[in-house]
Structures are given as C-alpha cells and as structure tokens.
Image (cartoon, helix red, strand yellow):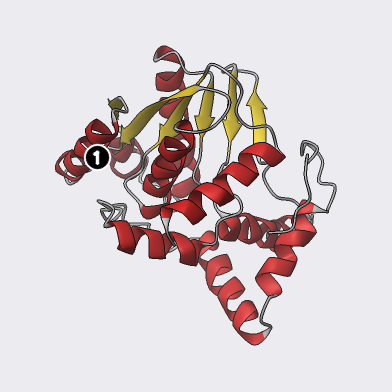
Amino acid sequence: MKLQQLLSYTRKAVDDYQMIQEGDRIAVGISGGKDSLTLLYALHGLMRFYPQSFELQAISVDLGFPEGKDALQPIAALCESMNVPFTVVPTDIKEVVFDIRKESNPCSLCAKLRKGAFNTAARELGCNKIAYAHHKNDMVETMILSLVYESRFFCFSPITYLDRMDLTLIRPLMYVDEADIIGFKNRYQLPVYKNPCPADGNTRREYAKQLLARLNHENPGCRDRMFTAILEGNIPGWPERKTDPCM
C-alpha cells in the first residue's frame, strides 16, 4: 500500500465519524508495532492538507522490559524527522504484572495499566484526543470475540468520549486492512520492533485472528461482509456515520 491510499482510507474514516476538529491536539500511542507506526504516518500526512488544522503528540509507554529503551531510538528519530514531539513514559508495568502479581493471564491488567499511563500522559501534554491504531481486522476480531465469549454482537466504536479523563478516543485506521498495513510497513521500512512481552501471540485475540483468517480463506469476502455488518449493525454507543460505508 502506498501513502496516498493510506491517506485516502484515513481521510474517509475521519470524515465519516467527524474524528478531528479545528485545534485538536492528538496523542498517538506508539507501541513500536506496524499498526501504531502506520497510524503516525497516516495522521502526519493528513495534517498537511486536512481543512481543520490539528497537532500531533507521539507517546510510547515503556513497560519496563530491558529491550524497550534501545528499540525506541529509531522511533524517536522518525518522529524528529516528522517534527512530531515524542515522549516516552517510564513505568514498572512489567514488574507489577509478571514479577509481583505473576499473572497467569496478564493481558487484561497490562492493557489497563498501559492505557492509564498513556491517557494520563496525554492529558499532561495538553492533548484533548487520543488515537489508537485499530484496523479493520481488529474490529472484526473484536466482534467475533464478543459473539463467542460474551453472547452479544458488539465492536468498539470509531470514536469514544472518555469522561473520566476528558479525552476523546479516535480510531482513524478502521477502514484499513491488516494486509495493507503489512505492505505499507515493508514499502516504507518502518522501524518496527518485536513485542518483548512473553504473552504476545498466546491470547484469545490471536485465536480470533486465526479463526477469521480461516473463515475468510474458506469463504472469500467473509471478513469484509462481517465488517459491513458491524457498520450497519446499530451497535449501542456508535456515532452516526456521515457518508456511505462503501470502500
């Protein structure tokens, strides 16, 4: 995927759900993975021509793994080249989750602590919005997890107001396929580093990812039809879409 196509998908999501307004300062969560770095490229590119002017602030939460600090240096260099301020938030999440609590299922607690650190930093840095890099596959996988484990048809919203933090969460990559993100990462040689978490790849979400891949292989177009069902599903809490869903 070329940058122009990425910007087209991003612009559509932003316009469809009115994600960005004049004067917004948006914190972009940078995990070091392909998705978050693609999001940084997308919003940085959008800044140059979007009719509402906005600012970006890149934030990485250091979980405390030894590999983390050195791995973030190429990302810091990328942000500097884009003239996007970059902040690393040090935490002891790794120690709390794995050494002290010794969680057998660490993902939920880790995610809660990581989001808390990120949101707090975003507020302290003057941001009124935060951007997550969830893409189309993430949304369909979330819907599958909700059906299988919660007996309900649900997916997180493209835009959500977090009243306790006075922050608005947006998901500008919602129309982008994961395969396109992989292609973008390879084309532009994004400075991706592997997640050092020992639980990476051994989760219910990974199960949903593999299940979705199998379903889409056996029933071509299945994933896109599921995504359309999400867009048209009248899910509680979702904002009104301003334009047609066709991509």
Q: Amino acid at mark 1?
A: Leu
Query: Vertically, is 167 above or below 209?
Result: above
In the figure, is residue 101 to the left or right of 244?
left
Identify the residue at the far left of this view.
70
Query: Vertically, is 1 above or below 14?
Result: below
> Residue 143: horizontal and vertical position, in percent?
69, 57
> Residue 98: horizontal and vertical position, in percent?
32, 45
Q: Quadrant of residue 100?
A: top left
> Residue 177: horizontal and vertical position, in percent?
54, 62
Residue beneath the point at 65% across and 19% down: 163
Residue beneath the point at 37% across and 57% down: 199
In the figure, is residue 147 to the left or right of 44?
right
Residue beneath the point at 69% across and 83% down: 219
> Residue 142: horizontal and vertical position, in percent?
63, 55
In the figure, is residue 32 to the left or right of 215?
left
- Viewer-side residue, 132 vs 41: 41
The N terminus sits in image quarter: bottom left
Q: Quadrant of residue 22?
A: top right
**Which residue is disc 1 drawn over?**
78
The answer to whether residue 11 is visible is yes
- Viewer-side residue, 163 vs 97: 163
Query: Vertically, is 144 above or below 75?
Result: below
Secondary structure of the residue carrying tag 1 is helix
